[in-house]
Image (cartoon, rainbow, N blue to C red):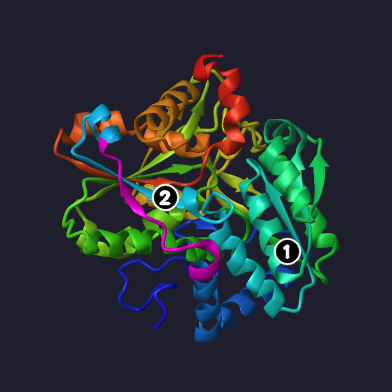
Amino acid sequence: MSTLFPNAQEAYFGPDAEGFYGPYGGRFVPETVMPALIELTAAYKEAREDEAFAAELTDLYVNYVGRETPLYSAKRLAEAVGLGRVLLKREDLCHTGAHKINNTLGQCLLAKRMGKKRVIAETGAGQHGVATATTAALMGLECAVFMGVEDIRRQSLNVYKMRLLGAEVIPVDEGSGTLANAVTAALRHWVERVEDTFYVLGSAVGPHPYPLMVRDFQSVIGNEIIAQLAEKNIGHVDAVCACVGGGSNAIGTFYPFVSAGAQFADTELVGAEAAGKGLDTGETGASLTLGSPGIMHGFYSYLLQDEAGNPLEAYSISAGLDYPGVGPEHAFFKDEGFVRYEPVSDTEALKAFELLTLTEGIIPAIESSHALALLPGLAEKYGPQATVVVTLSGRGDKDIDIVREAGLGGE
């Protein structure tokens, strides 16, 4: 049986048939969208049970993406933060430079299976946009990517890559011109072109079945970590960390550990969300720390909202984390105590970015740097012999202008 998807022996399944993780998730969309979601749900259920689909995806993971990605022991970083061992899950070494392609390959294979000729996507940091454009080129699909104008300014290198790969980049100038506005525009466009267009959603958000699909395709991260720990004869891990915006790399990291049940009961799972300029500044993306349950983009979860239930603008130095909500399974994990979520400020993330760069010669994405920023606190909590795994979700080439503006590198 394929190891890509959950099996009957797992302790936690989620979601139920209607796409709810406890009270979170679901499909809160206009009636006009429901037929498309029902069609997508049925098509994914069929593909999920088809071993040929899993085999084709596994072949692409191995021969196109370059999986499995290493679980690298960062010895100088461990010494610098006061831990016994830091293991980096190197998703930055995936083809296109981030974990996003794990999901776009799965969704675009499904699009072809459904007979769709055109795909659309939203993107914040540009990593999901590049991954979708790459996969569309590979599979001969027409591609359009919605991106906020502020994110286009911050991530110009990825915009250029998308266009090189043949994708149309559609600027979104509504609201703050960031990820949340791009998701809204993409959903609106999908409703208008649903007959020939497949929406490749990049994070673990949106109406059912998107959070489930993204989790399944990204769970290759956590499954590989567990297998690699066994290969290295590492019997105990004190903590596993990942950054959380919408939450795609984090859910792919955490879900296999949660579903393993007792095997990792004494391993703490920690998600790093964007505190931005500080929790008390009003310029933050910490929806799990400061938010409350509400509805946005067709699903129910924690979100930053005003008293009338309108989403607030989120902020982070990281274009991939300034989303005012979070995937519904993360909301469930928070309430159930499966995962602890901790806010990390821009300043802390930049410090972690610089430390990994100088100690290991690895330039991380600013998104991933939020997870790295948790290490000193975990060293204080678990002591100098502790072992911590961090999912390094992407590389930092795209962020060079941002860190230069922040004063790193001596300029």
Look at the image and say whether residue 4 sits in the magenta stretch.
no
For the N terminus, the quadrant is bottom left
For mark 2, give the secondary structure.
strand
Check disc 2 and report the residue beneath it: 90
Q: Which mark is residue 183?
A: none
Q: Which residues are magenta?
A: 62-75
- Above or below: residue 81 compared with residue 105: above
| Dot 1 amino acid type | Ala
For mark 1, give the secondary structure.
helix
From the viewer's perspective, tell me whether residue 128 is left or right of residue 339: right
Can the viewer see residue 26?
A: no
Q: Which mark is residue 137?
A: 1
Q: Nearer the viewer, residue 58 or 192?
A: 58
Quadrant in the rendering for residue 318? top right
Quadrant in the rendering for residue 399? top right
User: Distance between the Cα atoms at labels 1 and 2?
Assistant: 24 Å
Residue at left 35%, top 79%? 8
Whichever of callouts 1 and 2 sits on the residue coming sooner in the sequence is 2
Q: Residue 34: where, in percent of width, then height?
A: 72, 68
Report the residue that reaches farthest toward the front: 361
Q: Nearer the viewer, residue 194 or 59?
A: 59
| Dot 2 amino acid type | Arg
- Above or below: residue 379 compared with residue 127: above
Q: Residue 353: where, in percent of width, then height?
A: 44, 30
Residue at left 71%, top 57%? 133
- Above or below: residue 315 compared with residue 30: above
From the viewer's perspective, tell me whether residue 226 is left or right of residue 99: left
The answer to whether mark 1 and mark 2 are in CB contact below 8 A is no
Look at the image and say whether residue 74 sits in the magenta stretch.
yes
Q: Residue 372: where, in percent of width, then height?
A: 38, 35
Q: Residue 12: where, in percent of width, then height?
A: 35, 66
Residue at left 45%, top 49%? 331
